[in-house]
Image: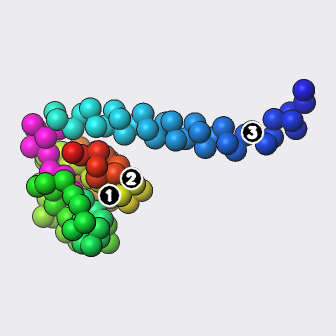
């Protein structure tokens, strides 16, 4: 069998590997959440207000991603911050914004349902 015979399987295999990695990563984060919450972590949901109103973790703060850079000063940089959104993409960007502003412990929980 030559390498060209494997070509149709490369992209599906890479997608499957990425999905598996993502699942395991968020599963590990979910296991850390109770400890972070005991340490005073705040959950920040970076979805838009309409999405947040449709369902969110009780007690979480809604700071849409577009407003996070300006509103980061509302958060305590010495406490852990758990960011979430609908899929994990916006919360990954939010984690980068907070880390660039000096937040030491920022955890991307991915979908907000992972914070329940």
Mark-to-mark CA distance, 1 and 2: 6 Å
Which numbered tag is attached to residue 9?
3
Q: Position of residue 11 (x, y in %)?
A: 70, 44
Q: Earlier in the sequence, mark 1 or mark 3?
A: 3
* Coloring scheme used: rainbow
Instruction: Find numbered disc 1 in the image and state the secondary structure of the residue it sits on.
Output: strand
Check contact, mark 1 vs mark 3: CB within 8 A. Answer: no
- Real-space Cα separation, disc 3 to disc 2, in angstroms: 27 Å
Q: Looking at the image, is 74 positioned above or below residue 10? A: below
- Residue 1, which numbered label? none
User: Which stretch appears magenta?
Assistant: 36-44
Residue furthest right in the image: 2
Left or right: 61 in relation to 97? left
Q: Which mark is residue 85?
A: 1
Residue at figure coordinates x 81%, y 35% from the top left: 6
Under circle 3, the secondary element is: helix
Rendered residue at 90%/30% (across/down): 2
Sequence-earlier tag: 3 or 2: 3
**CB within 8 Å, label 3 to label 2:** no
Mark 3 Cα-neighbour bin, 10 Å: few <14, some 14–19, many ≥20: few
- Residue 63 shown in magenta: no
- Say which residue appears at 28% left-offset and 49% top-offset: 113
> What is the spatial separation of the Cα atoms under label 1 and label 3, in whole angstroms?
32 Å
User: Image height check: is 95 above or below 69?
Assistant: above
Task: For the residues labelled 1 and 2, say whether their Cβ atoms are less than 8 Å apart.
Answer: yes
Quadrant occupied by the N terminus: top right
Residue at the extreme top of the image, as rendered: 1
Residue underneath mark 2: 88
- SS of the residue at dot 2? loop
The quarter in which the C terminus is drawn is top left
**Which is more foreground, mark 3 or mark 2?**
3
């Amino acid at each position: 069998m030559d390498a060209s015979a494997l070509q149709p399987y490369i992209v599906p295999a890479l997608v499957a590997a990425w999905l598996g990695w993502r699942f395991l990563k968020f599963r590990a984060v979910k296991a850390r959440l109770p400890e972070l919450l005991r340490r005073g972590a705040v959950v920040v949901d970076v979805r838009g207000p309409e999405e947040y109103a449709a369902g969110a973790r009780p007690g979480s703060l809604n700071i849409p991603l577009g407003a996070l850079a300006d509103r980061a000063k509302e958060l305590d940089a010495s406490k852990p911050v758990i960011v979430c959104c609908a899929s994990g993409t916006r919360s990954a960007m939010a984690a980068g914004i907070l880390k660039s502003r000096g937040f030491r412990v920022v955890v991307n929980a991915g979908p907000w349902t992972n914070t329940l």
